[in-house]
C-alpha cells in the first residue's frame, strides 16, 4: 500500500485552513534532502508555517512539500521530503497530528506473505496499527 503520510498531511492542512487557523509542520531538518534556512533550525528541527498566506507555490505532494516563503525579509525555496515531516498542527490551538515513525515509506517487510503454513511466522512479527491520542 502507499504511505498514509501525504494523504493525512493534505487532509489536516485542509481541515486546519478551513477552520480559520494556521497550519504549521514540524520538520526533521537533519534528514536527507531537506532544504530549509539553517539559521532557524533548533535542536535539529524547524517549524514551518504552511498557510496559503505565508507561502507561494505551495505543493503538498506524495513525495515532498515545497514552497517559497520569506525568512528575515529574503525569499527562500523550501523543499522537504515527506519522510522528514514529523507532524502538522494548528498554531492557535495546537490541534493536529504527530506522524508515527516509519510511516512515510512503505516497509519492505510488509510484502506478500511468505510461502508456507501461517503458523511458520511468529506472532510477534505481525504489525498492528496503533492509534494515538493527540491533544
Image (cartoon, rainbow, N blue to C red):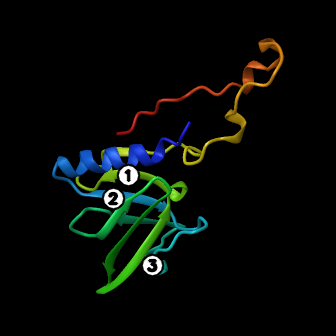
- Residue located at (32% from left, 45% from top): 12
Pick the residue in front: 32 or 116. Answer: 116
Q: Earlier in the sequence, mark 3 or mark 1?
A: 3
In whole angstroms, how far apart are the C-alphas of marks 2 and 3? 16 Å
Taking the image as shown, residue 2 lies to the left or right of residue 17, namely right
User: Helix, strand or loop at disc 1?
Assistant: strand
In whole angstroms, how far apart are the C-alphas of marks 3 and 1? 19 Å
Q: Earlier in the sequence, mark 2 or mark 3?
A: 2
Within-10-Å neighbours for mark 3: few <14, some 14–19, many 20+: some
Mark seen at residue 37: 3
Q: Earlier in the sequence, mark 2 or mark 1?
A: 2
> Where is residue 90 shown, x and y percent of the image?
28, 52
Q: List the residue tagged with mark 1.
A: 88
> Where is residue 62 shown, x and y percent of the image?
46, 52
Within-10-Å neighbours for mark 2: few <14, some 14–19, many 20+: many
Pick the residue in front: 52 or 117. Answer: 117
- Residue located at (49% from left, 78% from top): 38
Taking the image as shown, residue 6 lies to the left or right of residue 54, namely right
User: Helix, strand or loop at disc 2?
Assistant: strand
Screen quadrant of the C terminus: top left
> Where is residue 34 shown, x and y percent of the image?
53, 69
Do the residues under discs 2 and 1 have CB atoms within 8 angstroms? yes
Mark seen at residue 59: none
Q: List the residue tagged with mark 2.
A: 24
> Where is residue 124 shown, x and y percent of the image?
73, 23
In whole angstroms, how far apart are the C-alphas of marks 2 and 1? 6 Å
Taking the image as shown, residue 13 lies to the left or right of residue 47, namely left
Task: In the rendered view, tell whether residue 86 sits above or below residue 46.
Answer: above
Within-10-Å neighbours for mark 1: few <14, some 14–19, many 20+: many
- Residue located at (47% from left, 30% from top): 131
Residue 93 seen in render: no
Amino acid at each position: 500500500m502507499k504511505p498514509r503520510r501525504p494523504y493525512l498531511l493534505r487532509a489536516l492542512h485542509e481541515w486546519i485552513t478551513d477552520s480559520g487557523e494556521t497550519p504549521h509542520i514540524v520538520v526533521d531538518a537533519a534528514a536527507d534532502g531537506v532544504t530549509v534556512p539553517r539559521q532557524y533550525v533548533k535542536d535539529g528541527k524547524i517549524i514551518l508555517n504552511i498557510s496559503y498566506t505565508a507561502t507561494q507555490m505551495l505543493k503538498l505532494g506524495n513525495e515532498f512539500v515545497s514552497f517559497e516563503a520569506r525568512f528575515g525579509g529574503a525569499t527562500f525555496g523550501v523543499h522537504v521530503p515527506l519522510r522528514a515531516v514529523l507532524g502538522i498542527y494548528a498554531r492557535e490551538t495546537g490541534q493536529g497530528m504527530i506522524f508515527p515513525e516509519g510511516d512515510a515509506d512503505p516497509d519492505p517487510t510488509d510484502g506478500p506473505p511468505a510461502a508456507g503454513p501461517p503458523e511458520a511466522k511468529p506472532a510477534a512479527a505481525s504489525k498492528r496499527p496503533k492509534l494515538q491520542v493527540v491533544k
